[in-house]
């Protein structure tokens, strides 16, 4: 028996960031988070379940993953699908990203979200977006936010089961049409400390974590309101403060690690002075500069002036799409 499905899903950039878990097995976060799905930056994944296979095989951009690499991500997701389907049927997963692997952009969120949509289609399960976001979350936390387009909200939930920790769309992709994300590729090297390890180190050691969680609780309604009102000044301010807050916790963690470099700090200073854009950094050196279309050229000129050579311009994009031949 052979069952096939294929889907694409977008990458996302967190505005309110996920940094810390209350349960590592289920990827249950300490705080709710908000992200933007990125237009034109996606993973395309095909899954083939075949009753003749005796293990999962995961190929990402032409390279097969080793046992350890796949077991904590894609295999975890496939195990959930096998449980729901009720048959132990293994899969060949072939995923490609449309952004270069060497761009330093994370692919796990888009890849895992594409995988859940592809598997749901292959097994004809008709699971809801909410259910799929929960399965994606178990694969990789931030992947749950790639199960929708537009502005995504991942509810932290309080239950041990994780059933109330899922993602939904708060504003559609065409809500704030002149918002752009200018991604400055500062480094193409793989980060030394993964998000998974980094956030665990922060949970175990950062004395600032508690303050950050309070800050997030207090300001999430303000972030949502700034999007609702398209209040760019407020939205830019909060975006930068949420990025700073995560990197402050990281700097406060022990054993010590830090993701930002000199060029990032230069970008941060310039954006703050400029006042018409926001920077945000995930667990890496690449800067996401959120601004309005009318200011994009000024930002691009600045990036060129400091010799940033690789730049990707995106905007708020759509959610996953199941592909049919
Ligand atoms: P991050 O996106 O968190 O920076 P990586 O890109 O290094 O991390 O990926 C971490 C793990 O996520 C990989 O070891 C792999 O198991 C899984 N992964 C990455 N990309 C994909 C994909 N396109 N499809 C399925 N799983 C993926
Ligand atoms: C800094 O989702 O990659 O990008 O749940 O362990 O797979 P796991 O972590 P992951 O962490 C993402 C962290 C972040 C912030 C964010 O996207 O919210």
Image (tube, helix red, strand yellow):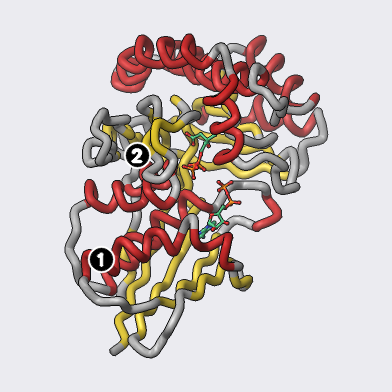
Q: Residue at position x 81%, y 29% from top?
A: 306
| Foreground of the two, 206 or 289 | 206
Whether label 2 lies within 8 Å of ligand 2 gets the answer no
Give residue 150's mark: 2
State whether residue 72 is above or below residue 166. Answer: below
**Residue 325 showing in the rendered view:** no
| Foreground of the two, 269 or 156 | 156
Q: Left or right: where does residue 46 sit relative to residue 1? A: right
Q: Position of residue 323 (x, y in %)?
A: 33, 69
| Foreground of the two, 314 or 243 | 243
Q: Which residue is mark 1?
A: 83
Q: Position of residue 236 (x, y in %)?
A: 50, 17
Q: Residue at position x 36%, y 51% from top?
A: 136
Residues packed near mark 1 inside 10 Å, few (<14), some (14 to 19) or many (20 plus)? few
Q: Secondary structure at mark 2?
A: loop
Q: Left or right: where does residue 275 sit relative to residue 285? A: left
Q: Quadrant of ligand 1?
A: bottom right
Q: CA distance from mark 1 to mark 2?
A: 31 Å
Image quadrant where residue 298 sits = top right
Q: Secondary structure at mark 1?
A: helix
Q: Position of residue 3 (x, y in %)?
A: 30, 81
**Residue 60 showing in the rendered view:** yes
């Amino acid at each position: 028996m052979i069952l096939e499905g294929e889907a694409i899903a977008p990458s996302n950039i967190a505005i309110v960031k996920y940094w810390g878990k209350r349960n590592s097995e289920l990827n249950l976060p300490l705080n709710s988070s908000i992200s933007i799905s990125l237009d034109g930056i996606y993973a395309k994944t095909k899954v083939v379940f075949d009753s003749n296979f005796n293990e999962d095989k995961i190929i990402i951009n032409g390279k097969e993953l080793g046992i350890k690499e796949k077991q904590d991500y894609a295999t975890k997701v496939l195990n959930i699908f096998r449980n729901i389907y009720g048959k132990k049927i293994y899969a060949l997963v072939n995923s490609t990203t449309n952004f270069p692997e060497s761009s330093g952009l994370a692919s796990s969120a888009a890849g895992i979200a594409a995988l859940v949509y592809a598997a749901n289609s292959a097994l004809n399960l008709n699971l809801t977006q909410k259910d799929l976001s929960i399965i994606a979350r178990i694969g990789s936390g931030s992947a749950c936010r790639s199960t929708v387009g537009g502005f995504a909200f991942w509810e932290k939930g309080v239950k041990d089961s994780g059933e109330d920790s899922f993602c939904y769309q708060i504003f559609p992709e065409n809500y704030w049409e002149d918002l752009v994300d200018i991604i400055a590729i500062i480094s193409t090297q793989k980060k030394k400390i993964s998000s998974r390890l980094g956030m665990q180190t922060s949970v175990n050691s950062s004395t600032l974590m508690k303050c950050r969680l309070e800050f997030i609780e207090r300001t999430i309604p303000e972030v949502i309101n700034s999007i609702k009102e398209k209040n760019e000044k407020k939205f830019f301010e909060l975006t930068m403060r949420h990025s700073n807050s995560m990197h402050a916790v990281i700097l406060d963690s022990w054993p010590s690690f830090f993701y930002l470099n000199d060029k990032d700090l230069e970008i941060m200073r310039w954006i703050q002075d400029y006042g018409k854009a926001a920077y945000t950094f995930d667990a890496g050196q690449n800067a996401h500069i959120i601004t309005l279309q009318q200011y994009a050229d000024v930002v691009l000129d600045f990036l060129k002036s400091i010799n940033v050579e690789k730049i990707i311009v995106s905007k708020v994009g759509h959610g996953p799409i199941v592909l049919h031949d």
